[in-house]
Image (cartoon, grey):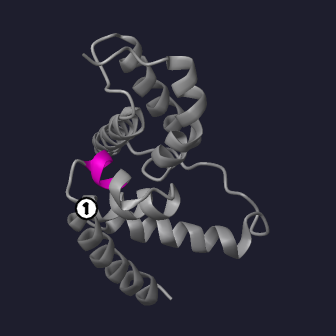
Amino acid sequence: MPSTPDLPELYEQYYRSLVKLASMYVDDRETAEEVTQDAFVKLLSGKYRIEPGKEGPYLRSIVLNGARSQLRKRRVRRAKIPEPPGLVAAAEIGGVGASERDDMLASLRTLPEKQASVLILRYYLDLSEAEIAETLNIARGSVKSHAHRGLAKLAKLLENSK
């Protein structure tokens, strides 16, 4: 029988990487933090029992699903009510690095869901193939295939955007 996880310890261990993961899907830190906190609240509710050693993949799965859900809600809202224009930072702030990062994120978001998830988990969170497979509930061979195809598509997209 799985035991109840030690939430403060899990929070300390995983919170930052989960916020990073969510921020790759949603483009503001507040929403990424909210998605991550919701994952911990779900664990706190007591409905979920996690086997020892499986906490990381389980929390990553909850955060991935929560971030995707936020994006779906956002698309529905934008279709009904356009967002007002935000403040624009001076051109010097962020510079070329921010522009390249934004191009990378925009291109990454156009990839099929599994390919984008694999690339984010691998190169942004630095997870192993085994950890990615466990998080996404797919075979390790599928992780390799999605990564290979995703990198190829991403390279073409970035090359075409120049």
Name the secondary structure under disc 1.
helix
Q: Any magenta on residue 76? A: no
Instruction: Please tell me in which quadrant of the rendered image residue 128 appears.
Output: bottom left
Provide the residue span drawn in magenta.
132-136
Give the amino acid type for the residue marked by disc 1 in the picture.
Arg
Q: Is residue 161 above or below residue 5?
A: below
Quadrant in the picture for the N terminus: top left
| Residue toward you, 24 or 40 | 40
| Residue toward you, 95 or 21 | 21
User: Does residue 159 appear left or right of residue 8 in this picture?
Assistant: left
Q: Is residue 92 above or below residue 10?
A: below
Residue in view at x 46 percent, y 44 percent = 22
Q: Main secondary structure of the magenta part?
A: helix
Res 98 seen here: yes
**How far across and how far down the image is residue 79, in percent?**
29, 46
Q: Any magenta on residue 135? A: yes
Q: Residues within 10 Å of mark 1 (few under 14, many from 20)?
A: some
**How far across and how far down the image is residue 19, in percent?**
53, 40
Q: Residue furthest right?
A: 92
Instruction: Write down the residue under mark 1.
Output: 140
Res 30 seen here: no
User: Does residue 9 appear left or right of residue 133 in this picture?
Assistant: right
Residue in view at x 31 percent, y 26 percent = 51
